[in-house]
Image (spheres, rainbow, N blue to C red):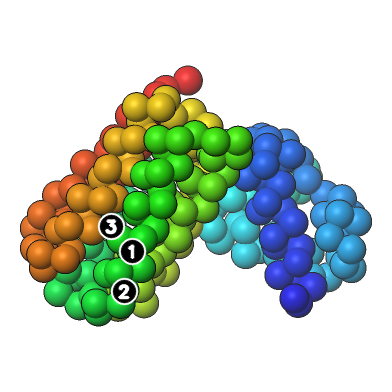
Amino acid sequence: MRAVDKAYQTVKQGILAGRFPPGSRITEHEIAAAAGVSRTPVREALRRLQAEGLVDFTPNFGAVITAWSDSDVDEVFQLRALLESHGARRAAALAKPEQLAELRRLAEEQFRESTERRAGYLDRIAELNSRFHHALQNMASSPRLARALAALIEAPLMMRTFHKYSPDDLQRSAMHHLEICSALEARDGDWAASVMASHVHAARGALGRE
């Protein structure tokens, strides 16, 4: 792994794990020490994180982990609903049989995890969810869409989305994924887009408001 990628992943995983909370300052020296790299790749990693909306720069203070207001979160989910619905509609027409089979496998595994809720299930669900949404993006065959969605999909993860879900929320999310699979297998773009929009809006509702 390149030094810049190592520094990037160190900060990003620290944010997701809650080690770097919103509004906290993070220094180049701190990142370099944690990642085991020099400060030069750290600067590039911070610029990348800033472009993704995960880090802000404050004059005379340095890098600060981005804090999200309710308005910010609302906008992220509104944009996701629009863009991911578009992607689902495209995927209904373009997905290959083997891609649909893999998507169905991910959805069924997530449903099992949401039902059985064995130790560590939230982390496994988060991973399965991420793989599901990225697989769906690949089916849509739109590099522009993938670039637009990259930071938006990661933003809710930064807030540890699934750790705020109730058991009912987890099952509803998994069932949405299963229904999206059914819509794609039926090649029904309107159905797929509609369920995806509901799925994203339900995720926002599950987070609640501070």
Give the residue drawn at x 53%, y 32%.
163
Whole-number angstrom distance, CA of label 2 to CA of label 3: 17 Å
In what element is the residue under mark 3? helix
Give the residue drawn at x 83%, y 70%.
40
Q: In this view, does 65 lie above or below 69?
A: below
Whole-number angstrom distance, CA of label 3 to CA of label 1: 15 Å
Give the crowd class for mark 3: few <14, some 14-19, many >=20 residues within 10 Å: many
Q: Nearer the viewer, mark 3 or mark 1?
A: 1
Left or right: residue 109 versus residue 140 is: right
Camera-side residue of 152 and 125: 125
Whole-number angstrom distance, CA of label 1 to CA of label 2: 6 Å
Which labelled disc corresponds to residue 151?
Answer: none
Pointers 1 and 2 in contact (CB under 8 A)?
Answer: yes
Which labelled disc corresponds to residue 84?
Answer: 3
Location of residue 94 by image quarter = bottom left
Give the residue drawn at x 39%, y 58%.
106
Residue 133, image x, y percentages:
38, 59
Residue 21, image x, y percentages:
68, 35
The reply to whether residue 210 is visible in this rendering is yes
Amino acid beneath label 2: Gln
Which labelled disc corresponds to residue 103?
Answer: 1
The reply to whether residue 70 is visible in this rendering is no
Left or right: residue 184 versus residue 175 is: left
Pointers 2 and 3 in contact (CB under 8 A)?
Answer: no
In what element is the residue under mark 1? helix
Residue annotated with mark 2: 99
Amino acid beneath label 3: Glu
Pointers 3 and 1 in contact (CB under 8 A)?
Answer: no
In what element is the residue under mark 2? helix
Q: Which of marks 2 and 3 is nearer the N terminus?
A: 3
Give the crowd class for mark 2: few <14, some 14-19, many >=20 residues within 10 Å: some
Residue 169, image x, y percentages:
35, 30
